[in-house]
Image: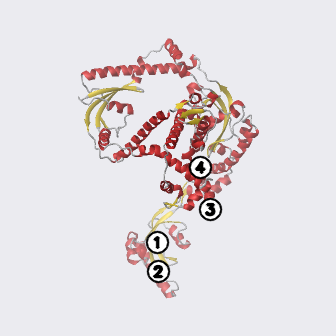
Amino acid sequence: MFDFIRTHQRLMQLILLILVVPSFVFLGISGYSFVTADPAVAEIGKLSVTKQEFTQAQRNQLQQMQESSQGRFDPALLDNPQARQALLDQLINRKVQVAVATQDHFSVSDNTLRRAIAAMPQVQVDGQFSADRYHEVLASIGMSPRDFEASQRAELALDTVLGPVRDTAALPKPVIESLKRALTEERTVRLRVFQAKDYTKDVAITPQDIKAWYDAHQNELRLPEQVSADYLVLDEAAAVASVPAISDAQLKDYYEQNKTRYVVPARVNVSHILIKLPSGASDEAAKAALASAQDLSRRARAEPQQFADLARKESQDAGTARDGGALGWIQRGTLPLPMEQAVFALKQGEVSDPVKGPDGYHVFIANQVQPEKGETFDEARGKVESEVRRQLAADRFADMATKLTSLVYDNASSLDPAAKELGLQVRKAQGIARDRLLTADEAGPQAAAASKDAATLGDVRVRQALFSRQVLTDKQNSGVIEISPDTMVVVRVDAMTPAHVPELDKVQAHIQSQLQAERAHAAAVAAGEKVLASLKQQASSEGFQDPVTLSRLDPAGLSKAVMDAAFTVPRQTLPAYGGVSLPDAYAIVQLDQVKPGSTGKPALDGLGAQMARVWGSVEEQALLVDLRKALGVKITDEGRQLIDKGDSGSN
């Protein structure tokens, strides 16, 4: 019974996630009925969300993110008030559904439950519910049918609170048609762009300006806590470099074994005439066949250009005679040895003497001859050595990885022993923060972000290791971190720099560049707005680019900001004008033409269903808001503190 489960463990884990997580991912089983003395972070009528439930939900959420990203998810993305508020709202909404379902005695019939379970693909075989598969799956996750069916009945009952609202939402057809017209409406526009860089030369920045900006933007300039790190990288390049010198004999052996990769063998494009000689034929018959072949060879040599016609008339090989006796390109090893020797002895256009083969006498003509070509060993030596090194390095990599793991563990306070033993270089990098790599402007010339290992050092697992207690506080090596199958890294903290605002002289160039950009942009906007005001008084296309036709479905390569401006310009009197500030410029949009587009585009076929889902979600959220008000949902002081500061806020 468990053979399937033992051989499909990862599949069973996925099934467990699909079947059980919907019920317990946020609440756990305690969310249904148990009461504890744990402080409440939210109150929902007679129910509550406890701090323990919230903490467990956070753990589950982080675990799922880590598993889905194979350990690359950054926990810092969930460690903020917005993420904690969103999670608490999910928990509250869940409890709201529990409260309403309990209060109004929502339930589902046995038939509904059976249909829902039978529809689960995880318990089907060939698209049909399988009782054996059902019990097999439940056994693999340690649940009895009774417990599982009770949990599913509860889920279905909860779904009846919001499901009917969500699933029956629909937009009237006139609304859908109106949306289609809006999405396909075509507007022809021209742009006139005022680039900020064109105004940089007119910007003057004084030391007083820089100091004032520095004083006013302390929070923006503040650098987070950061570390400088020593690290070792074990990758393909390191493994290749560790391979000792390779002898010429080894290289030559490899070249000969893989010669076809460097040399194209000789080949001949041939045609033939066959005079058959049946097996067991008499001497007289053999002499007659040979005489006929000799005559054909003589005639072919007299007029080689007529060989194909001669083969069509005289060859007894029906398969090739119709094609003038063509056999195509022949390489060595294709024909019996006597025939091969005769063929490869021919020059282009030359006709052979009769050659006896297994089925009779053959007369060959060499249509084309290509001699062996390619690289000699000396010419290919560099390639051969590189390939041999890579192959040897692949074997050494696994051994080096094992040694690296032992060496950094046995010498926890230094990377030098591992580097010396394995021939690796201890590299250094600065400016590694918990959530990012600082730029070279922020961290200096040895910034991790500017190094060739930026992608490796920026990996969330590397940053987590550097700020772990073992590495940051205890000053020990990290374990071996596998970035990819062929890249491993070990890190240790060299120095830690607290969060701080850099001295003015260290950020002066950055501030000057920032001020220049800001003021040049302001000048571009001012110039553009001045021209826009004059155009609204007197229309003109001077200075505008070529016209572009766009729609909300087809932005024609324009940015969202320009698109929004194009569809905001009034259409009553054309041409009409609008303006928009862009990150590095200011653009004036001239609207020349507005016309309806085609609403029959395939891209719009599913619009009604899509909008129904969106509208259903909106109505569902509106109902939840009303239910929360009716139940008197309240976030407690403990909950507010937890949202604002996380777990540390309550300690």
Image: 257 above or below 222: below
Disc 4 to disc 2, C-alpha distance: 49 Å
Of pointers 4 and 2, the one earlier in the residue sequence:
2
Of pointers 3 and 4, the one earlier in the residue sequence:
3
Crowding at dot 1, Cα within 10 Å, few <14 / some 14-19 / many 20+, comes out as many
Nearer to us: label 3 or label 1: 3
What residue lies at 65% left-to-right and 25% top-to-bottom?
497
Disc 1 to disc 4, C-alpha distance: 39 Å
Q: Position of residue 482 (x, y in %)?
A: 64, 43
Q: Quadrant of residue 646?
A: top right
Crowding at dot 4, Cα within 10 Å, few <14 / some 14-19 / many 20+, comes out as few
Image: 60 above or below 212: below
Of pointers 3 and 2, the one earlier in the residue sequence:
3
**Closer to the camera in the image, 278 or 55:** 55
Give me the disc on residue 50: none
**Closer to the camera in the image, 250 or 599:** 599
State the SS at label 2: strand
Of pointers 3 and 1, the one earlier in the residue sequence:
3
Crowding at dot 2, Cα within 10 Å, few <14 / some 14-19 / many 20+, comes out as many
State the SS at label 1: strand
For the residues bearing labels 1 and 4, Cβ distance under 8 angstroms: no
Nearer to us: label 1 or label 2: 2
Task: Name the residue that disc number 2 marks.
Answer: 276
Q: Amino acid at mark 1?
A: Phe
Give me the disc on residue 383: 4
What residue lies at 24% left-to-right and 22% top-to-bottom?
538
